[in-house]
């Protein structure tokens, strides 16, 4: 048996056409027969029709069929033709296919002349990969808006190249019977298209039409008119419900925020004219238009027709293009930008079942625009910046990420708590879950268990090993400890470092700067401003921020001024916050020590009057970055002692400069550069190895990221950063998975 990792050079169709023409003049040699097993993302992406067409071009007999491992092809004909077929298979595969491997074996010829698409094989090992959901393609869009087409304005139009996948799949192989479309019987016309090899809906599993397919629960015109009146409409999408309102209507947005209990965290906007709202770099434009259709953070235009309360306190606006036919119709009819935020209360999991949504969103939404195509599994919108994702979810899940080593046995890594994800590993493939939200409520916890169960079913994995965070109280860790399986507990920042390293295909050793909010340290203090020397098996804490007490514990995270006060005391500077004498008392009873870099940014933001209280995680730091902008400033100095970075020096400098009347923007810039210099210097002291990975939520701060990276590179370090995974805690499960895979061999 021959096993090849398929290479995918540019298509060279004309070469094959030429070669086939030459061949067809010959009578052909003795017929041979080959069986090819194609693994990877090859179901639900138009692969069988493509194989069918290819076999016809090369005049081969045989069949193609889905099975639980991928696509099985048997082809019979002259050797030369078989070779051309095999080469074209890898090189001309449909754009959404991801071929992982092709196994080829010679078998007995049977004299077959015809080529057919055979029914899927039942049973066997289930390793076929389910594709991610795919945004409506251009061909379907044309039909959607063509009055003469029978699917004119039909909100569920799709084809072999587009439509729902991951969110409707119940099991592999990917056939209609294994999706939530199973209950919709195809009408005669749809059936004909589905069975016609020349039709672009040939074996398009979710295909349907107004005759036979799903229906909306509310007229589109009515929904649009409600939106124009400033109402909030819950709209059923691909992986769950959105809450929508007119993005230009200040009162509508304010009402949505109040009902959803989301005070200031930015809301995403859907528009078919993004250029009216944001300035786009070519990279941002490409991401926005990619088949994954994520929310892209881009710089808001000053004249953008969007209410100020959509994204207060930041110049960044999350925009996305319509990605389902329903969205396209809505955007076209509404003719303006719509807020499209997750259908949930604050940071709970997104609602995705009709009855559940009506129960949970009934108090928020004025109306529901729903339909009767069930969503099998929840999947929230992905959020990306040009350089890296902030949330890797719809459009990406369940696409696997490769690990640098192969797992001895299947395993599950349960992730962290905020921005939670889990990760399932089979061989060297890491299947990251969609975004699960913050795992600190009963609702989120039960969603975590359900989603994990569904994921394991889909992947046919029974884990033999678990990995979780060292934290004593994370629900994801508690769940893992309650299972009767071998368990590896991983330190939070080691997982961060490992995620970035493994994402870059390496196993170490390396240095890691992990600048993060909160993570449980083995010494019982809170870590988060760390320089580690590590590999995928182990780590050593080389240097870290000198910890300060968090007066009142969690309360200090919500009220950054408390941390500023603690830092000022450490720096022997006066504390002017009015509540300090009272809060200071809490130092005696509840003041865990924290070395978190996020807390240092909070303190600086509070001192600069950016924000004394926050309403969502990371808010103070985001607004501090905004204040610093691109201003130039000499970095503040900061002493280092016995592996401790004395960041109180930075806070003292802010205090003194404020007292001297220096501009806040310049101070914020000097602080950013001071932090970058301090950590770059720590790396210089550590000296070896010469590779540094950067991870942790603070590296979502582009100014900090750029400055640290530049300084390290100038010092001669090789710097590895995230590009496939978010730097925040969403990458933790992948890091745990990498460590578990590497350690247990
Ligand atoms: Zn299509
Ligand atoms: Zn139909």
Image (cartoon, rainbow, N blue to C red):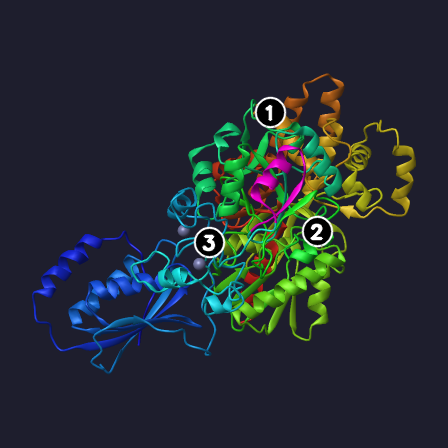
* Mark 3: few/some/many CA within 10 Å (<14, 14-19, 20+): many
Q: Position of residue 261 (x, y in %)?
A: 75, 42
Q: Position of residue 114 (x, y in %)?
A: 23, 73
Q: Which mark is residue 348?
A: 2
* Position above or below: 125 against 357: below
Q: Position of residue 204 (x, y in %)?
A: 41, 60
Which marked residue is nearer to the observer: mark 2 or mark 1? 2
Q: Which residues are magenta?
A: 218-237
Where does label 1 land, which residue?
634
Is residue 519 shown in magenta?
no
Q: Position of residue 374 (x, y in %)?
A: 58, 60
Q: Is residue 302 visible to the viewer in this orientation of the structure?
A: yes
Q: Residue at x 45, y 36 (%)?
A: 285
Helix or strand or loop: what does disc 1 sit on? loop
Mark 3 residue CB less than 8 A from any atom of ligand 1: yes
Which marked residue is nearer to the observer: mark 3 or mark 2? 3
* Mark 1: few/some/many CA within 10 Å (<14, 14-19, 20+): few
* Position above or below: 260 against 57: above
- The image quadrant where one finds ligand 2 is bottom left
Where does label 3 land, which residue?
163
Helix or strand or loop: what does disc 3 sit on? loop
Q: Residue at x 74, y 50 (%)?
A: 526
C-alpha separation, residue under disc 3 versus residue under disc 2 = 26 Å
Which marked residue is nearer to the observer: mark 1 or mark 3? 3
Sooner in the amino-acid sequence: mark 2 or mark 1 = 2
């Amino acid at each position: 048996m021959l096993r090849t990792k398929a290479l995918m050079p540019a298509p060279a169709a004309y070469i094959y056409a030429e070669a086939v023409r030459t061949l067809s003049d010959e009578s052909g040699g003795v017929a041979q027969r080959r069986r090819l097993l194609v693994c990877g993302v090859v179901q639900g992406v138009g692969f069988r029709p493509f194989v069918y067409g290819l076999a016809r071009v090369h005049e081969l007999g045989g069949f193609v069929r889905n099975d639980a491992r991928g696509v099985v092809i048997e082809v019979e004909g002259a050797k030369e033709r078989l070779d051309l077929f095999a080469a074209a298979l890898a090189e001309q595969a449909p754009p959404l296919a991801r071929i992982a491997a092709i196994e080829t074996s010679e078998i007995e010829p049977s004299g077959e002349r015809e080529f057919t698409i055979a029914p899927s094989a039942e049973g066997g090992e289930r390793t076929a990969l389910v594709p991610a959901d795919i945004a409506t393609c251009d061909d379907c869009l044309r039909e959607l808006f063509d009055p003469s087409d029978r699917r004119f304005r039909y909100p569920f139009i799709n084809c072999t190249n587009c439509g729902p996948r991951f969110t409707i799949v119940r099991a592999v192989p990917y056939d209609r019977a294994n999706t939530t479309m199973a209950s919709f019987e195809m009408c005669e016309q749809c059936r004909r298209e589905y069975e016609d090899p020349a039709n672009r809906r040939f074996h398009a599993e979710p295909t349907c039409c107004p005759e036979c397919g799903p229906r909306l629960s509310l007229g589109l015109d009515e929904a649009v008119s409600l939106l124009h009146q400033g109402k909030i409409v819950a709209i059923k999408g691909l992986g769950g419900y959105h809450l929508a309102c007119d993005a230009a209507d200040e009162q509508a947005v304010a009402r949505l925020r109040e009902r959803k209990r989301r005070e200031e965290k930015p809301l995403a906007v859907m528009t078919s004219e993004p250029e009216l709202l944001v300035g786009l770099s070519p990279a941002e434009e490409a991401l926005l238009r990619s088949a994954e259709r994520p929310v892209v953070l881009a710089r808001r235009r000053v004249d953008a027709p969007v209410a100020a309360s959509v994204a207060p306190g930041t110049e960044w606006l999350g925009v996305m293009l319509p990605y389902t036919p329903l969205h396209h119709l809505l955007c076209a009819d509404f003719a303006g930008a719509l807020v499209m935020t997750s259908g949930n209360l604050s940071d709970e999991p997104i609602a995705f079942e009709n009855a559940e949504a009506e129960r949970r969103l009934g108090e928020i939404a004025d109306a529901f625009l729903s339909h009767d195509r069930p969503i099998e599994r929840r999947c929230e919108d992905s959020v990306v910046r040009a350089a890296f994702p902030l949330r890797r979810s719809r459009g990406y899940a369940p696409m696997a990420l490769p690990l640098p080593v192969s797992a001895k046995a299947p395993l599950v890594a349960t992730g962290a708590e905020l921005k939670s994800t889990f990760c399932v590993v089979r061989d060297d493939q890491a299947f990251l879950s969609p975004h699960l939200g913050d795992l600190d409520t009963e609702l989120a916890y039960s969603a975590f268990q359900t989603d994990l169960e569904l994921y394991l079913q889909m992947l046919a994995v029974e884990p033999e090993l678990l990995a979780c965070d060292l934290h004593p109280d994370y629900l994801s860790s508690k769940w893992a400890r309650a299972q009767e399986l071998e368990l590896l507990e991983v330190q939070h920042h080691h997982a961060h470092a490992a995620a970035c390293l493994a994402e870059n295909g390496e196993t170490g050793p390396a240095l890691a700067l992990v600048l993060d909010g909160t993570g449980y340290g083995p010494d019982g203090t809170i870590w988060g401003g760390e320089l580690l020397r590590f590999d995928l098996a182990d780590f050593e804490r080389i240097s870290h921020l000198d910890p300060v007490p968090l007066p009142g514990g969690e309360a200090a995270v919500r009220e950054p001024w408390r941390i500023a006060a603690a830092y000022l005391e450490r720096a022997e500077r006066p504390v002017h916050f009015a509540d300090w004498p009272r809060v200071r008392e809490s130092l005696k009873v509840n003041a865990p020590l924290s070395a978190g870099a996020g807390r240092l940014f909070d303190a600086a933001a509070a001192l600069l009057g950016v924000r004394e209280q926050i309403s969502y995680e990371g808010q103070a730091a985001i607004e501090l970055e905004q204040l610093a902008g691109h201003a130039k400033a000499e970095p503040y100095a900061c002493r280092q002692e016995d592996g401790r970075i004395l960041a109180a020096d930075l806070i003292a400098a802010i205090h003194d400069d404020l007292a001297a009347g220096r501009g806040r923007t310049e101070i914020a810039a000097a602080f950013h550069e001071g932090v970058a210099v301090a950590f770059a210097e720590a790396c210089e002291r550590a000296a070896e190895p010469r590779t540094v990975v950067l991870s942790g939520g603070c590296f979502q701060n582009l100014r900090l990221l750029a400055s640290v990276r530049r300084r390290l590179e100038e010092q001669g370090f090789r710097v590895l950063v995230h590009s496939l995974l978010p730097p925040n805690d969403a990458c933790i499960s992948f890091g745990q998975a990498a460590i578990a895979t590497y350690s247990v061999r």
